[in-house]
Every structure is written in C-alpha cells, then in structure tokens.
Amino acid sequence: MTSARANARRSLALWHRIAKSRDQRILDAYDAGLTKSEIHRLTGVSRKRDIQGLAQQARGRRRR
C-alpha cells in the first residue's frame, strides 16, 4: 500500500471516530449553554435541521 493510500485510510478512520460522537458533542455544548448560532459558527452544522433537532432532544431529556 502506498503511503498516500495509508494516510488516506488513517485520515478517514479519524474522521469516522470524531463524526460518530458529533451529535453528543453538540448536545453537550447546547446543555452547557451555547446557543444554536454559536454552535453553528463553531462547527458549520446546519442550525435549522441538525441543531434544532438535537436541541429538541435535549429539552426532552431535561423534562424526564
């Protein structure tokens, strides 16, 4: 395997590990008091669909 190919595999594996915990990291930030706008500016994650849906999950967790 070429070094470029090995580097690409390592890079994708790292991306996968980080992406797997994306939602939890956003929920943690929202629970810590960051606004949806702040989270969007820092991550580039869509405010309307992704962050809003996660925020609704967080509010549901708080009611339990």
Image: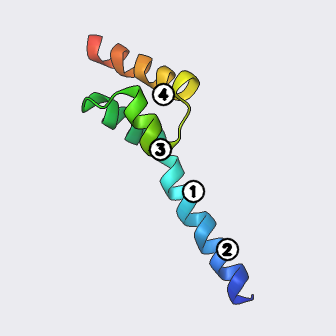
Do the residues under discs 3 and 4 have CB atoms within 8 angstroms?
A: no
Determine whether the residue tagged by mark 1 lies in a helix, strand or loop: helix
Q: Which mark is residue 43?
A: 3
Q: Earlier in the sequence, mark 2 or mark 1?
A: 2
Circle 3: is it few (<14), some (14-19), or many (20+) Cα within 10 Å?
few
Q: Which mark is residue 51?
A: 4
Give amino acid for label 1: His
Q: Quadrant of residue 9?
A: bottom right
Determine whether the residue tagged by mark 3 lies in a helix, strand or loop: helix
Determine whether the residue tagged by mark 4 lies in a helix, strand or loop: helix
Q: Earlier in the sequence, mark 2 or mark 4?
A: 2
* Mark 1, residue position: 16
* Mark 2, residue position: 8
Residues under labels 2 and 1: Cα distance? 12 Å
Circle 4: is it few (<14), some (14-19), or many (20+) Cα within 10 Å?
many
Question: Relative to 37, is 7 on the left or the right?
Answer: right
Residues under labels 2 and 4: Cα distance? 29 Å
Give amino acid for label 3: Thr
Circle 1: is it few (<14), some (14-19), or many (20+) Cα within 10 Å?
few
Residues under labels 2 and 3: Cα distance? 23 Å
Whether residue 64 is visible: no
Q: Earlier in the sequence, mark 4 or mark 1?
A: 1
Do the residues under discs 2 and 1 have CB atoms within 8 angstroms?
A: no
Give amino acid for label 4: Ile
